[in-house]
Image (cartoon, rainbow, N blue to C red):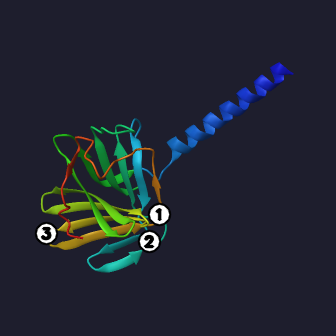
Amino acid sequence: MFRRTTKFLTVITALGVHLCGAAASDSQLSHCQTGEHVYLNAILDYQNIDGALQQRTGLGDVLSVCSDQIREPIRGLTIRYGKPGAALVEYRATPAKRLKMHVARTGPSMAVQVLSWSVGSRTYCITEGAGLQHGVSFYVVDGDRVASYGESSDYERGPVGIDFYQRLSPVFVKLSPSCNL
């Protein structure tokens, strides 16, 4: 009986490991790569380009925020945005090329956490609702106008923790976002 139970548990454990591994490696809903840890994955359901709000039909663009560490201090944070498997935007934050981080209180028990960076005349902003607020948005601001915008209320938070109230990682600098949302 002991031998049979041990064999059964070994098969169940192997099956569980296989299923968990398959789900993680076969996921097409993340731009995070092997060795990176998920902070955030979002399929952006709506997109606003030049004033026209369009609801996506089918699979929208994926926004992924991927870290080199599960816990702070984080030394590398990569943001990728685009169709699954084909990122249009990729930004790698390092201690030499930091992201702006900011928390904006929007009401009692509500806030928006913001990560932003600039490349040339464009500023990129990711907002995530905190407290009683919920949802993720991705803005691309070109000069003084919003060139593109996407949002999602159905998103995945990974195991990576980022403290927006303290700067615990050298890849962040606490500054107000330059996206003027």
For the N terminus, the quadrant is top right
- Distance from label 3 to label 2 (Cα)? 26 Å
Residue 84 in view here: no
The reply to whether the C-beta atoms of the residues labelled 2 and 1 are less than 8 Å apart is yes
- Could you tell me residue 12's position as x and y percent? 72, 33
**Label 3 amino acid?**
Gly
Q: Is residue 147 above or below residue 67?
A: below
Q: Residue at x 35, y 50 (%)?
A: 65
Looking at the image, is 86 positioned above or below residue 105? above
Q: Residue at x 26, y 61 (%)?
A: 125
Give the mark nearer the N terminus: 1 vs 3.
1
The label shown at residue 166 is none
User: x and y percent of residue 100 in the render?
Assistant: 21, 54
Residue at which label 3 appears: 143
Looking at numbered disc 1 in the image, what kind of residue is underneath it? Leu
Task: Select label 3 or label 2 by which is in front.
Answer: 3
Disc 2 versus disc 1: distance between alpha carbons?
7 Å
User: x and y percent of residue 29 in the render?
Assistant: 47, 53
Q: Which mark is residue 59?
A: 1
Secondary element type, mark 1:
loop
Quadrant that contains the C terminus: bottom left
The residue that disc 2 covers is 56
Tell me the residue at 31%/69% (across/down).
149
* Front position in the image: 61 or 169: 169
